[in-house]
Amino acid sequence: MSKPGQGGSPAVKAQRLIPPLPMGRRIFANFKSAPFPYDGVVPSTGKPFLDVEIAGRRGRQSLRAPGQIYWADETYRDNRVLIDLPPGFSPSRPAVLVIYLHGNGAILARDVVTRQKIPQQVAGAGLNSALIAPQLARDAADSSAGRFWDAGALTAFLDEAAVQLAKLAGGPRAKALFDAMPVVLVAYSGGYFPLASLLEHGGSAERIAGVIILDGLYGEQTKFADWISARRSAFFFAAFGPSSVEGTAELAQLLKRRDIPVATALAPHLDPGSVTLLEVPSTVEHADFATKAWVELPLGDLLRRVPGYRRQPVR
């Protein structure tokens, strides 16, 4: 994994000046590049994403529940992004950005923060890392990617995130540091679908240091296999239970045909180029997977295995 702050670039000059944060910082920022609102088409069909209009109110027909409509003003209008920095974070030290895609039926504050405990897990891993979690379809059984379907969506999202992160840690001089940081993309459950789009044509491929999927290989296996084949300097990890066992087996077969080795046990480190498909006990509930899988707080356990990027303790 590449580490920023080498040589005599502007990033290095900023590196010498920005102290660690004495306290953690958390905001919910409005992003122009957030997945929603979205008023385009569904790439796989070419049809409008918002395909229902009643009395001037626009919405989308649910693909899972015939007759149910997700209204745009309730489900697809929230452009907030959670940004969380732990105490001791410093952009002047080697750091990594963790982008978390939350899955179906979620709201950032209620589910990502409180129920799934994602900021707690990322901070507890001890990485010098920033958490960035966009709101996907709000509190709905919908995995739509919205603007993350667009070519270059990851690049645009990271550009905007760097501006917001610099405001929280270091000011404008820190933006060059955030612009250079590697990225770990994490998807839980239905978050796999926007993740696949970002990997396929989101841009900034050289910055992606690794991918983590928590019980979410329900489709797009060819896109994941293509990314793994093309990005052999990054790690890929997927944990699965009964609900995603078939999709995981399909990905394993694709990788076998491409002669890409796959581990089925969790190694001490998520090394560059490694591919791990980990089965968890059948007693693990899918709804609890983000907080209880092979261990309590599994994302924190995985991030502790990412080499480098250690955060200095706050004194």
Image (cartoon, grey):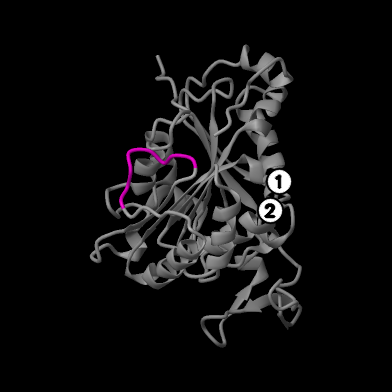
Residue linked to disc 2? 202
**Horizontal placement of 37 versus 220: left or right?**
right
Please tell me how crowded label 2 is: few (under 14), some (14-19), or many (20+) other residues with Cα within 10 Å: many
Image point (50%, 33%), residue name: 129
Q: Quadrant of the N terminus?
A: top right
- Please tell me in which quadrant of the rendered image residue 315 appears: top left
Based on the picture, tell me whether residue 50 belongs to the magenta stretch: no
Please tell me how crowded label 1 is: few (under 14), some (14-19), or many (20+) other residues with Cα within 10 Å: some
Q: CA distance from mark 2 to mark 1?
A: 6 Å
Q: Position of residue 268 (x, y in %)?
A: 32, 38
Against 13, residue 144 (above or below) is below
Q: Main secondary structure of the magenta part?
A: loop
**Horizontal placement of 13 versus 227: left or right?**
right
Residue linked to disc 1? 155
- Please tell me in which quadrant of the rendered image residue 250 appears: bottom left
Amino acid type, residue under disc 2 in the picture: Gly
Q: Position of residue 147 (x, y in %)?
A: 70, 59
Image point (63%, 60%), residue name: 197
The disc, 2 or 1, on the residue closer to the chain's N-terminal end is 1
State whether residue 39 appears in this view: yes
Image point (30%, 53%), residue name: 292
State whether residue 37 appears in this view: no
Instruction: Indicate the secondary structure of the residue bearing disc 1.
Output: helix
Image point (52%, 81%), residue name: 64
Against 259, residue 123 (above or below) is above
Q: Tell which of 56 and 265 is nearer to you.
A: 265
Query: Marks 1 and 2: in contact by CB < 8 Å?
Result: yes
**Horizontal placement of 22 versus 165: left or right?**
left
Against 91, residue 68 (above or below) is below
Q: Tell which of 17 and 22 is nearer to you.
A: 17
Amino acid type, residue under disc 1 in the picture: Thr
Magenta segment = 265-272
